[in-house]
Structure formats: C-alpha cells, structure tokens
C-alpha cells in the first residue's frame, strides 16, 4: 500500500491541469484546491505577471520551488503546479515523498489553442512565435513526465471521463491518503489557531448540504469571537462563496435542461448522449464531408461524438476516438475517410454482432451512425435488431443502394469518369482507334450509363441490359462505314470482363482496341459540390431525427427530398437504371 498526503497535478502551460482538472478533482474528492500561482500572489501581493517582471526568472523559480516544498506537506489537497518551466529533478524527488504525482499533458495544437485564448495573460509566453515556443516547452517537459506516477493526455475527451480515469488509476495503484491535516506552513500565525482555522475550512468544503450552511456560518462567527482572529473572516467569505457557487450550479443545470431537453442520458440525470460514427466498406468521395457535418451538428445539439476507426472491425477492436469541431476541420474537401475503413465479412456472424453490441454499450454509446453502402446498412440493421439505435447515411460511388435515388459519392465518381473518358477520347480520335474503358458499379450500371450519356460514348455495356458481343462488333462496323474514325465503349464491371471484350473485338473485327481500367481513380478526390451539400443535408436530418427519438433509418434522397426510410422498406425500394436513358444513348450515339 502506498501512503501519500495529497495529489499534485504537474504539467506544462496550457495542459489543462488547473482549469480542467484541479478544481474539478478537488470538488469531486471533497478536498481543498491549491494553485501555487495564487499562493505566490498572496505572498508578494502582486499579480503573477507583475511578480515575474519584478523579480526576474531565477528569483521567480526559486520562490516557486520554495512554495512547492511547503504545499507538498498539505493533507488531502489537490495541488496545481507547472508552467513553461519544467520542475527540476531534485525537487520532484522531494515532492514524490509526500504527493502522488499526476502528469497532465496535451498535444501541441491543443496547447496552442488554449494559450491563444489568453493572449498577453501569460508573462513567460512568447506570443510572437507561439508554435515554436510551445514545441520547445513540450520537449523540456518530457523528462519530467517520465518520473510521474501517472500521466494523462488531455488532448481530446471530456472532463468526466478524465476524472474517472484518475480515480481508476488511484484504485489500481493502491495509493491511500492520510486524512490528518497539518497546519498551513504558509501562515505566520499561531499553530493552534491555524490548525483550528484549517479544520473549519475543510468542514465547509466537505459539506454538501446547502440547508446546513447558514448554521455553519453562525458557528464560524462564534468561533471567530472565541479565537479573536481576523483570519476567520476569510472563512466566512469562503462559506458565502460556496453557497453562491452551488446556487449557480443549480441554476445552470435548470437552464441546461430547458435548452437541451433531449440530452437526458439513459442512465438518468443531466448528461450528453453519445454518438459514434463509422465508415464501412469501399471509400467514397463525401465520406469526410459527412463525418464533418455529423460531428459539428451533433456537438451543436449537445451530443458527445466519437469516431470508430476501420468500420465494424474497429468496434471489435474498440478503436474509439473522441471527435471535436477542430478534429474534423479542413476535411470537407478531402477524399477518402479520416476514420479509415475496412471490410469485415465476419460481422455477418450473429455472435460477432452480439459482441459488437456489448462493446458499444460498454462505451456508453447511445447511437451508432453508419456511413457506407448496402453491406454497411445490413450491419446497422443487425445491430438495430439487438436493440442498438442506428442510422445509415448512404455513401457509395456505385449508387446501387435501395431506399435512395442518389448516394453520396456517385456524382463525384461520375464526373471523374466523364473527365477521364474525355481525355481518352482525344487520344482515340488522334489514332483512329476503338477505346474500351472499364468503370466501377458492381452489379449496377449507373456510372456507365450516366457517364456514357454525359461524354457521348458510342456503346455502353451494363449488367441490367447486356448487349451481346457480336452486336457490339456489328455496331462498330456500321459506324466505320458511316465514316466514324473512332469509338468509345464503356463497360460496367458487372456486365463483362473488359479484357474478354477487347479480345473478342480483336478476333472478329479488324479493330485493335485499347483498354483502360479506371479502377480506384473513381473513388479518390474531393467531393463535388452536389455530394458535399448532400452529405451536409443528410447529416443535419440524421441528427435532428435522433433528437426526436427516431432511429433505425436510412436517409434516402428521393425526388429532391431527404426522407427517413426504415431498413425493411429500403431493402425493397429499388431504383434501377432508367430504360429511357439507355434508349436515348443508342439514338445519340448513331
């Protein structure tokens, strides 16, 4: 068993040790909170910035170390220490005898953002080159963190979870804290008087019943008269501050419940509902746009947002990462998915699905939003049957999902194909050759047909209306007779093997066609304006539905409107290729 007197939070400037953790941890444990900066201000009677300017860096550090050696003797206290100057090794060895040392650190971008909120407020900060200064400061603190009993990264996450991690670590390490308090070494008064004053102060701090506080104020007044000390007046002020703070907390909770009535957590009490987002299956342009819109809309409405890396596989491997407005910044124009994606066929197994459900619940995930194609939607449907609240945003370049006329990514892929075929056409025209271009689409011909109409292809081979290869050869000969010097043939991957088409044409005609397989070229690149806007609108509707307790839906785009479609209805509501488009193509290509 490890016996300590207090908890000391140390870390660089902007790590969050004081604002985020110090006061919260002290209030949670019912202890006193000690900020060494405030102690220094009390000693010199000046703001911390003026102290530093007046006495200089060396004297400032000596004064700070002197304070540390005294406050580390406090019992049941949370002490905040740190800044841009790292604690020296010999000082840290002394502190560790009495204090359980918790290092608080954060990534460079997070510290920079926190520092910039208080420009000019930090006396030792170089605001002319913040990034370089913060980088050097982080490097100087690294050896200190290695000597800490426990190190916590505060880059992303919520305060409640961080507090729980600290509590869990304290239990796991077996550390115990002495309940006895010592006289305050910073006071110059009588030890007996200081001890009684500190005892009264601690009893006020620990008291959690507001109805008893007025009685304690009267008791402190009587004690003041008995002690005959002006210092006890400070206790009266502290008690009043406690009363006012608790009244303010109650008022904030009342206002929050009125502003966010949907944020009542399923466990009861005021808490943020948790949303997890994953991308599954093949990547598509617009996935990042959807992640960004979902995250920011959800946070705006009071949800806590997490990302699941690598799709359903990431659930099984518990790859959850917190998402914030900043973490999704700048990704709207990027292709692919920042959450990564993976195919996980094992998810079809019911035992795997049940385990995934248990993992989601163990992380207190209230809603799972799936971005992907029909296979991804089937995974969401399976989890919904187990009781998980899910939503699916259709995102695949193939545009082959039921329940929606358009999927995110289709328009971008279509424009990519049209651009590529236009370039291939230029070369085919120059060499008077037949060009075969294979496009994606799986078992659907949406990309091939729409691209054929847009770029003027002579022949389009799609799975829904396969043209016999001998008809293809006949059509090529007829166009040659009419004086056409080149032709472009688009082949959907689900219709024919493009290599077989090339061999057949070469064997039964005098043409020697070229073959281009566009492949992953169609998946990459930033989304078109249509796809980015569609992702934003679907994400908005998704979060609003969850706020109204509507879930287990696919967001379908039908006749220009976004509609929530049940999974059962989506499976039967299909939108095949338009036969009129195919007829029009044959007319225009003659």
Image (spheres, rainbow, N blue to C red):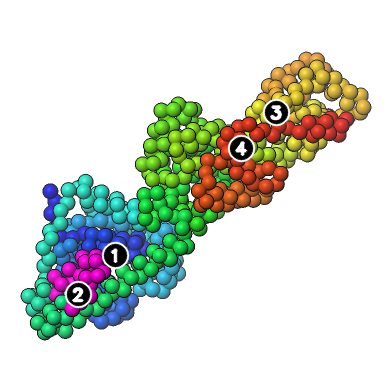
**Mark identifier at residue 77:** none
Q: Residue furthest top?
A: 507
Q: Residues within 10 Å of mark 2 (few under 14, many from 20)?
A: few
Report which quarter residue 73 is drawn in. Answer: bottom left
**Mark identifier at residue 396:** 4
Mark 2: secondary structure:
helix
User: For the residues carrying marks 2 and 3, which lies nearer the camera in this image?
Assistant: 2
Residue 256 coordinates in the image, percent (x, y)? 43, 63
Q: Residue under label 2, please give it.
A: 215
Q: Are marks 2 and 3 in contact (CB under 8 Å)?
A: no
Residue 510 coordinates in the image, percent (x, y)? 83, 18
Mark 3: secondary structure:
strand
Q: Earlier in the sequence, mark 2 or mark 4?
A: 2
Taking the magenta stretch, the answer to whether it contains residue 202 is: yes
User: For the residues carrying marks 2 and 4, which lies nearer the camera in this image?
Assistant: 2
Q: Residues within 10 Å of mark 1 (few under 14, many from 20)?
A: some
Please state the extent of the stretch shown in magenta in the rendering. 197-218
Q: Residue under label 3, please give it.
A: 492
Q: Are marks 2 and 1 in contact (CB under 8 Å)?
A: no
**Prevailing SS of the magenta stretch:** helix
How far apart marks 1 and 4 lie (CA) works out to 48 Å
Against 361, is 51 above or below?
Answer: below
How far apart marks 4 and 3 lie (CA) works out to 16 Å
Residue displayed at 22% across by 57% down = 101
Report which quarter residue 441 is drawn in. Answer: top right
**Mark identifier at residue 23:** 1
């Amino acid at each position: 068993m490890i016996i300590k007197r207090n908890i000391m939070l140390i870390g660089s400037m902007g790590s969050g040790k004081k604002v985020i953790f110090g006061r919260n941890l002290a209030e949670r444990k019912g202890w006193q909170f000690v900020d060494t900066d405030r102690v220094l201000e009390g000693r010199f009677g000046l703001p911390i910035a003026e102290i530093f300017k007046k006495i200089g860096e060396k004297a400032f550090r000596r004064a700070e170390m002197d304070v540390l050696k005294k406050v580390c003797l406090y019992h049941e206290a949370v002490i905040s220490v740190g800044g841009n100057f790292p604690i020296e090794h010999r000082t840290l060895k002394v502190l560790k005898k009495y204090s359980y040392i918790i290092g608080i650190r954060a990534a460079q971008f997070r510290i920079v953002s926190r520092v910039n909120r208080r420009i000019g407020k930090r006396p030792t900060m170089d605001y002319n080159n913040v990034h370089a200064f913060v980088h050097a400061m982080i490097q100087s603190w690294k050896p200190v963190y290695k000597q800490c009993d426990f190190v916590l990264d505060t880059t992303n996450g919520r305060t409640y979870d961080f507090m729980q991690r600290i509590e869990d670590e304290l239990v796991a390490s077996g550390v115990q804290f002495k309940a006895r308090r010592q006289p305050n070494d910073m006071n110059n008064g009588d030890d007996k008087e200081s001890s009684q004053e500190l005892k009264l102060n601690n009893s006020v701090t620990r008291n959690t019943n507001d109805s008893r506080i007025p009685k304690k104020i009267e008791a402190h007044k009587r004690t003041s008269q008995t002690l005959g000390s002006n210092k006890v007046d400070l206790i009266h002020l502290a008690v009043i501050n406690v009363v006012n703070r608790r009244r303010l907390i109650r008022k904030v909770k009342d206002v929050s419940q009125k502003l966010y009535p949907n944020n009542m957590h399923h466990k009861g009490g005021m808490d943020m509902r948790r949303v997890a987002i994953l991308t599954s299956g093949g990547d598509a342009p617009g996935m990042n746009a959807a992640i960004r819109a979902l995250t920011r809309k959800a946070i705006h409405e009071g949800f806590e947002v997490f990302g699941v890396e690598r799709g359903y596989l990431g659930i099984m491997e518990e790859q959850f990462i917190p998402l914030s407005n900043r973490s999704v910044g700048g990704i709207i124009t990027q292709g692919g998915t920042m959450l990564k994606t993976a195919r996980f066929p094992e998810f079809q197994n019911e035992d795997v699905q049940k385990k995934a459900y248990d993992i989601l619940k163990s992380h207190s995930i209230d809603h799972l939003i799936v971005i992907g194609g029909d296979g991804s939607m089937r995974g969401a449907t399976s989890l919904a049957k187990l009781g998980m609240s899910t939503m699916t945003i259709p995102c695949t370049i193939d545009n082959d999902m039921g329940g929606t006329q358009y999927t995110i990514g289709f328009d971008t892929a279509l424009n990519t194909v049209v651009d590529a075929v236009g370039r291939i056409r230029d070369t085919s025209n120059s060499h008077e050759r037949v060009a075969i271009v294979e496009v994606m689409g799986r078992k659907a011909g949406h990309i091939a047909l729409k691209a054929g109409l847009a770029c003027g292809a002579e022949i389009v081979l799609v799975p829904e209306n396969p043209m016999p290869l001998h008809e293809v050869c006949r059509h090529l000969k007829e166009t040659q007779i009419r004086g056409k010097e080149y032709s472009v043939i688009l082949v959907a991957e689900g219709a024919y093997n493009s290599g077989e088409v090339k061999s057949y044409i070469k064997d039964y005609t005098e043409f020697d066609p070229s073959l281009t397989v566009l492949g992953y070229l169609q998946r990459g690149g930033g989304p078109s304006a249509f796809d980015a806007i569609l992702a934003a609108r679907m994400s908005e509707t998704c979060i609003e539905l969850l706020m109204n307790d509507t879930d287990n839906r696919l967001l379908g785009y039908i006749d220009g409107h976004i509609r929530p479609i049940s999974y059962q209805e989506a499976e039967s509501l299909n939108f095949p290729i338009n036969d009129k488009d195919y007829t029009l193509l044959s007319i225009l290509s003659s």
